[in-house]
Image: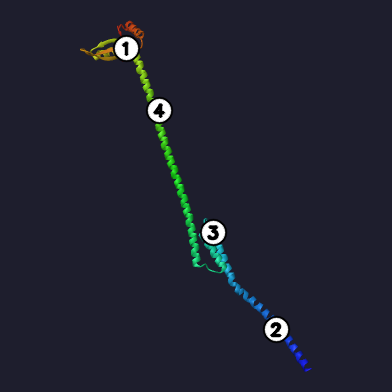
Amino acid sequence: MIREREGSKGIRFFIVFFFAAIFFFAVGFIVNRWFFAKEAPKSQAPSTEKEAALKKIDSDRKGEDAKKKNPIVGEEKEDLTFYKTLQNGKEPSPLKQQKTEERVQKKEEKIQKTEDKGQKKEEKEQKTAEKSQKSEKTDNKEEKKQKEKSKAEVKNKIAKKEKIKADSSSKEKRFALQIAAFKEKDKAEDVAGSLKKKGYEPYIVPVTIPEKGIWYRVRIGRFATRPDAQNIQAKLKKSEGISAFITFTTE
C-alpha cells in the first residue's frame, strides 16, 4: 500500500510539473511577443528614417536630372552608386569611388578624343574642298585666258587676211590718171584741194627724179583696167578741161 501511494504521488508530481512547465512556457511566449511588439517600432524607426532619407535623396536627384538638359554620365553613375550603397546600408569606400571616377574620366577622355578626331576629319575635308574650289577657279581663269587668247589670235589672223586682201586689191588697181606734177608741194596741194571740192579723190605721190630732186605728182584713182581709167579721163576732159594721161602705178 505504501508503495502504491508513493507511486501515485510521483505520478501526480510529474503531472503537476508537466502542466506547470506548459503554463510557464505559454506565459513566457505571450510575454515575449508582447515585449517585442512594443520594441518593434523603436527598432524599425531607424529603417523608416533611412527610407525617408533615401526617398528625399531620390527626389532631389530626379529634380537635378530634370533641370539638367545634358547630365554628365559620371555624375549619374555616382548618384546611382550612392543610392545603392545607402540601400545596402554601407558607405562607398574611397578606393572604389576613386576607381569609379577614374573610369568615368577615362570614358570622357575617350569620347573627347573621338570628337576631336571627327572635328579634325571635318576640317581636313573642308580644306580639301577649298583647295579643289581654288584649283577649279584657277582652271577656269586659265580656260578664260586661253579662250581670250585664241579669240585674239583669230582676230589677228582675220585682220591679216583682210590686210592682205586690201593690199592685193590695191595692187590689182594698177592704172591711175596723172593730173600734174610740181616741184613745189604747195602747188600740188592746191590742185588736189580744188579736185577734191569737185567730188574727186586726188592724192599726191612724191617722187625723186635724178638730177631734178623731189617732184610732187597729183593723181586720181587706182583702176584695175585701162578702160576704167579711160572713162574717168574722158570725163575730166569734158567737164573740167583737164588733160590727164594714164600711167602705171603700184602704190
Tell me the amino acid under the disc marked 4.
Lys
Q: Nearer the viewer, residue 35 or 192?
A: 35
Disc 3 to disc 4, how far (Cα)?
A: 72 Å
Nearest to N terminus: mark 3 or mark 4: 3
Disc 2 to disc 4, how far (Cα)?
A: 132 Å
- Closest to the camera, between mark 4 and mark 1, is 4
Q: Position of residue 21 (x, y in %)?
A: 70, 83
Q: Position of residue 78 (x, y in %)?
A: 52, 62
| Displayed quadrant of residue 234 | top left
Image: 162 above or below 141: above
Q: Quadrant of the N terminus?
A: bottom right
Kindly identify which residue carries mark 2: 21
Q: Residues within 10 Å of mark 4 (few under 14, many from 20)?
A: few
Kindly identify which residue carries mark 4: 151
Q: Residues within 10 Å of mark 1 (few under 14, many from 20)?
A: many
Q: Position of residue 165 (x, y in %)?
A: 37, 18
The answer to whether residue 199 is visible is no
